Image: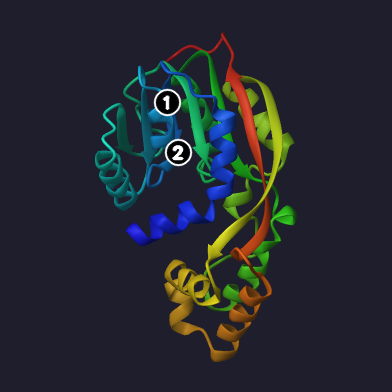
Amino acid sequence: MLDRADFYDAELKRYNEHLRAASNVRMDDQVLDIGCGAGQSTRDAARIAVKGRAIGIDTSTEMLEVARQRSDEVGLRNIVFEQGDAQSHSFSTTNFDLCLSRFGVMFFADPAAAFGNIARAMRPAGRIVWMVWQSQDHNKWSASIRRILAPQSTISEGVVPAFSLGDPIVAKKLLNSAGFVSVDFTDVREPVFYGADVDSAFNALVDLYPDWASKASDDTVQRLRDLLEEHMTNDGVLFDSRAWIITAHKGYSITSA
């Protein structure tokens, strides 16, 4: 699991820099990080919010164990990790100044309920800074990989949850309904990193999709390797991608539950 956590952080390294800059964390902020995973963005916030604290929430027990371990290793004391689904989680405080998410808010079964629950945990005028993928049309790396993996996997041909907030009209409507106002979208285009070379990128995908790997034919394996080879650069295997940074703040009419 430590290796997988490292993979995600490396994959999204360029995007993380944009999120950190846009977040504008303040020294006394109470920060909530949705879908925190191994806690990189939570730690980034905690290092700045030295008079406040950062709380990360995720559904993965294994990732949270890594997050706690890494926070302990660097001596952060103003940081807490909670296991739960932000759609229904009872947050320990209802006065968050800032809610962050690095690709963690696209997977809710009921996004309207989730965004409403998050809004109730925030103080009036509290800010959100969320990074989400743009539409699948702007992230052809995902479709390219899926076309190879789909014959031996359970990946559907429908809308992939990772891109569920790619349409600004849809995302803005959901946020407005939850009580967020001044919703804005910033276009960010960066490559995602899959490995230093073809072998490491291939092994990463095998780890991510073990069922596919156990059934893949030699021809399918070669197709995947060819795809990775096509995207090999001097900086490793990179796939072009695009995301939104969504910013908004909570309107004063929303009250805590």
Label drawn at residue 48: 1
Q: Residue at x 64, y 23 (%)?
A: 176
- In the image, taking residue 87 as reference, residue 144 lies left or right, namely right
Image quarter (top left, top right, bottom left or bottom right) of the C terminus: top left
As displayed, is residue 100 above or below residue 142?
Answer: above
The residue that disc 2 covers is 41
**Given this view, does label 2 or label 1 mark the residue nearer the observer?**
1
Residue 121 in sight here: yes
Please indicate whether residue 168 sits to the left or right of residue 207 in the image. right
Q: Identify which residue is drawn at 31% across, 45% down.
A: 64
Assess whether mark 1 and mark 2 are in contact (beta carbons under 8 angstroms): no
The part of the image, by quadrant, that contains residue 191 is bottom right
Is residue 155 shown left or right of residue 233?
left
Q: How is the image coloured?
A: rainbow
Q: Hey, what amino acid is under mark 1?
A: Ile
Query: Who is closer to the viewer here, 85 or 182?
Result: 182
Q: Which amino acid does label 2 sit on?
A: Ser
Q: Which residue is drawn at 59% across and 86% down?
A: 222
Residue 90 occupies quadrant: top left
Name the quadrant containing residue 146.
bottom right
- The mark total stands at 2
Taking depth in this image into account, of 20 and 56 the one nearest to the observer is: 20
User: x and y percent of residue 128 in the render?
Assistant: 55, 26
SS for dot 2: helix
Kindly identify the residue that appears in the image at 38 percent across and 37 percent down: 57
From mark 2 to mark 1, how far is it between C-alphas?
11 Å
Position above or below: 205 against 224: above
Q: How far from the left and from the top, in percent, is residue 31?
A: 42, 25
